[in-house]
Image: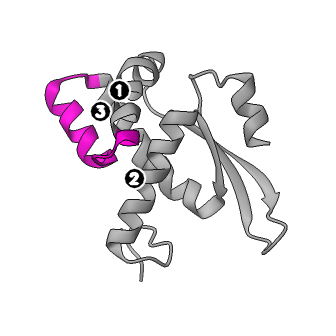
Amino acid sequence: MRHRSKTVKLQRDKAHREALLRNLAASLIEHGQIRTTLAKAKALRPYAEKLVTLGKKNTLHSRRRALTLLGSNQLAQRSSKKLFEEIAPASADRQGGYTRIIKLGQRRSDSAPMAMIQWVDVAVSADAEAEEA
């Protein structure tokens, strides 16, 4: 039985899965939307929404917690800054549901179901949309 077993393992061990989610979250914050497999997008959604909740609190502890969740490289530093300055204030009046998953169909090479995950309240620039396509 799988009662209350919430973690999606994505056929990876714990360290690899945490690194994957950390990198996907940093890319989502950096670009506003990313294109990935449907399973990874569904696993990323709660991780990213917890980051926005931390960003809405905007305390020193929440900033340090977000850096812990995002990692310590330069992309994580930029992403954390953007999270607290742009994404969290745009979602200030929303009580959850900060991300949207759009199904894109099958990937051509291996027929994996693809999806686009993006922020609901943050406007994505037109050049970023053209870059994703």
Estimate the x, y position of residue 115 in percent, counting from the top left: 70, 52
Location of the C terminus (image quadrant): top right
Location of the N terminus (image quadrant): bottom left
Q: Residue at x 35, y 23 (%)?
A: 84
Task: Give the number of the disc on residue 54.
Answer: 3
Q: Mark 3 is on which residue type?
A: Leu
| Mark 2 or mark 1: whose residue is earlier in sequence | 2
| Alpha carbons under labels 1 and 3: distance apart | 12 Å
Local secondary structure at mark 3: helix
Q: Residue furthest right?
A: 108
Q: Mark 2 is on which residue type?
A: Arg
Task: Give the number of the disc on residue 22.
Answer: 2
Q: Magenta part mainly helix, strand or loop?
A: helix
Q: Report whether 67 appears left or right of 100.
A: left
Question: What segment carries the magenta color?
Answer: 57-76
Q: Is residue 38 above or below residue 99?
A: below
Asked whether disc 2 touches disc 1, contact meaning CB atoms under 8 Å apart, the reply is no
Estimate the x, y position of residue 83 in percent, counting from the top left: 40, 28
Local secondary structure at mark 1: helix
Is residue 5 visible in this depiction of the protein? no
| Mark 1 or mark 3: whose residue is earlier in sequence | 3
Quadrant of the image occupied by residue 32? top right
Q: Report whether 41 appears left or right of 126.
A: left
Of badges 2 and 3, nearer the viewer stands 2
Residue 46 part of the magenta-drawn span: no
Is residue 19 visible in this depiction of the protein? yes
Estimate the x, y position of residue 29 in percent, counting from the top left: 48, 35
Of badges 1 and 3, nearer the viewer stands 1
Estimate the x, y position of residue 44 in percent, counting from the top left: 49, 52
Q: Residues within 10 Å of mark 1 (few under 14, many from 20)?
A: some
Q: Which residue is mark 1?
A: 81
Q: Mark 1 is on which residue type?
A: Lys
